[in-house]
Image (cartoon, coloured by chain):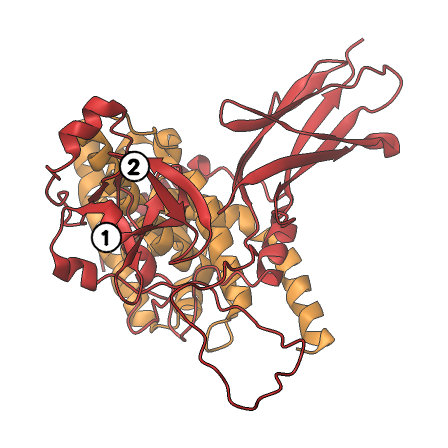
Amino acid sequence: MADFDDIDALLSSSLKGAAEPANSAGVADAIRSRVDAGDAGTSVAGSTAPGWGGGSAAGILPWLGLIVVAGIVGGVVGVTGVLGQPAGPVDDGVPTYVLVPDTAVAYACPGGPEAGALQAGTRVLAVQRSEDSSYLGVRNPNDLRQTLWFPAGDISVDAAQTEIAALPVGSCPEVTVTVVTPTPTPTPTPEPTNEPQPPRDTTAPQTTKMTANPTMVINGQASEISINASDNVGVTGVALSWSGPNGLSGSAPMVFQSGTWRYTWSYASFSNGFGNWTFTARAADAAGNLSAPAQVIVNRQYLG
Amino acid sequence: MSPVVTERVEMDLDTFVATEYPKVVAAVGLITGNRQDAADAVQDAIVGFLAKPPAREISNVAAWITVVASNRARDLQRSKAAEARALAKVGVDDESTDDVLSSLDIDVKAAIETLPLQQKQVTVLHYLLDQSVETIAEGLGVSEGTIKTQLFRARKALATRLRKEDHRG
C-alpha cells in the first residue's frame, strides 16, 4: 500500500482552508416554498447516487441540452449580416438558430399567450419543440432559466431537420376546465383544438443574487440592498421588508435600476437598533405569484 | 401525506440546512470551482430530495446531495462554457466566474482540477467533510471497493503531481 500520509495532510488542510462555509440564512424557507409550489428540483430518484453506476439521471438529462448560445448580434447591420446566412453549429454540436423577422413575438408555450419579443438577429438555442414542430422553444437570452416559444417560421435554422426532430417535445400546461352549466344535448361537440386558451400564469418569479452593500454599517450609514428577479411573464415589483433588534421593522418597495431591484436602507437612531437586521425580498408578477423569500443580513454597529 | 411525515421532513430540512448545508455548498464549490453555481445546485438537489426522495432511505444525505449537486453544477458549467464560446463568436464578453478555488494552494488546485469528477467528489467528501470510505459508500449506494478505488486513484494522481511540484520547487 502506498504511503499517502503527506498527501492526506496536505489535502485535508488545503481543502478546509479554502472552503468557506456558505450562508444558510433563509435557505430552508426558500427550499420549503419551492417544494410547496411543486418544484421538482434536481431528481435524486434511484438507490444509487446519480453518476455512480446505475443511478437515475432523470431530471438531469433533459436539462443537459439547455445550452444557451445566445447573444444579441445587435442593430440592423448585424441582423442583415446574419439573416439568410445562418452560422453552422457551434463547436460542441449544439444547434443554433437565428430569428428572422425584425421583432419576433415570443409565446409562453406553443399557441399560448405572448410573453415578450426578441430582436431579429438574436442568436438563440432551441431546446424544445411542439409536438408538430410548428413551434420551437428557445432559451431566453435575457433569462437563462426561461423558455420562450416562437413559431418555427420565425426562426432561421442552422441545423439539420433531424436535429430539430430530436428535441424534446414541450407543450402548454394542462388547463383544468370546470363545467358551469350542463349542456342540454348529450352529444359532445369536438372543440377546435388549433387555438388553445391561454393558460393562467401560475409560475412564480424567481430571485437571485440578493446582496447588501455593505453588510456591516456604522451608526446611520446606508446599505444598498439589491436583488435580481425574473419571471416567465414579467416581474411587476419586489417588496422588501426588514426586521432588526428591539422589535424594529419596516418595509418598502424596491426600485428597478440598471437591471437590478434596489433599495438603500439606513437607520439613524443612536439609542437602539444595533445588531443584525434581516432583509427579506419577494418578487411578484402581474398574476399575483410571489417568489420564494430571499434574505440577507446587515449588521449595524455603534461607533461613539 | 400525513402531518407526521410533513413535520419530520421539515424538521430534517431545518437541521440539514443549519448544520450540513454550509459545508455541502463549500464542498460542491470546491468540486466545481464555482460557489454561486454550487449554492444553486445544492438547493436544487435538496428540493429534488424532498419532492421525490431516493428509492431507498439515505442516512448520509450530505454525501448524496454533494454528488447530485456537483453533477448538476458540472452540467451547468458545461452549458456556460458552450455559451461563452458562442458569445465570443458574436463579440460578447463572458461573465467572469466566481472561482472559489482561487484561495486554494495553486499546486493543489491544479492537481485537483485534473481529477475526473467522481475522484473529485470522493476526495472532497473524504478530506473536507471528513467522511470515511464506509460512510461515503453507504451514502452513494455503492460498494466500499468502488469508493476505495476512486480514492486510491485520486490520492495516487495527486501524490504524483504534488510531489513532483514539491521537488521542482
What residue is rendered at 41% in x and 68% in y? B134
User: Is residue B72 among the parts visible in the rendering?
Assistant: yes
Q: Which chain is red?
A: A
Instruction: Check if mark 1's residue and mark 2's residue have beta carbons within 8 Å.
Output: no
Pointer 2: what residue? Answer: B109
Query: In this orientation, which residue lies closer to the viewer: A287 or A185?
Result: A185
Label 1 SS? loop
**Quarter of the image where the C terminus of chain A is located:** top right
Residue B105 is situated, as x and y percent measured from the top left of the image, at 33, 31
Residue A72 is situated, as x and y percent measured from the top left of the image, at 29, 30
What residue is rendered at 44% in x and 80% in y? A190
What residue is rendered at 39% in x and 68% in y? B137
Q: Is residue A185 left or right of residue B68?
A: right
User: Which residue is most to the front?
Assistant: A184
Measure how far apart labels 1 and 2 are at the Cα level.
14 Å
- Please name the amino acid that badge 2 sits on: Lys
Can you say whether A187 is above or below A57 in the image?
Answer: below
Tell me the crowding category of disc 2: few under 14, some 14 to 19, or many 20 or more residues within 10 angstroms, Cα based: some
Residue A50 is situated, as x and y percent measured from the top left of the image, at 35, 66
Mark 1 against mark 2, which lies toward the viewer?
1
Query: In this orientation, which residue lies closer to the viewer: B32 or B44?
Result: B44
User: Is residue B168 among the parts visible in the rendering?
Assistant: no
Pointer 1: what residue? Answer: B116
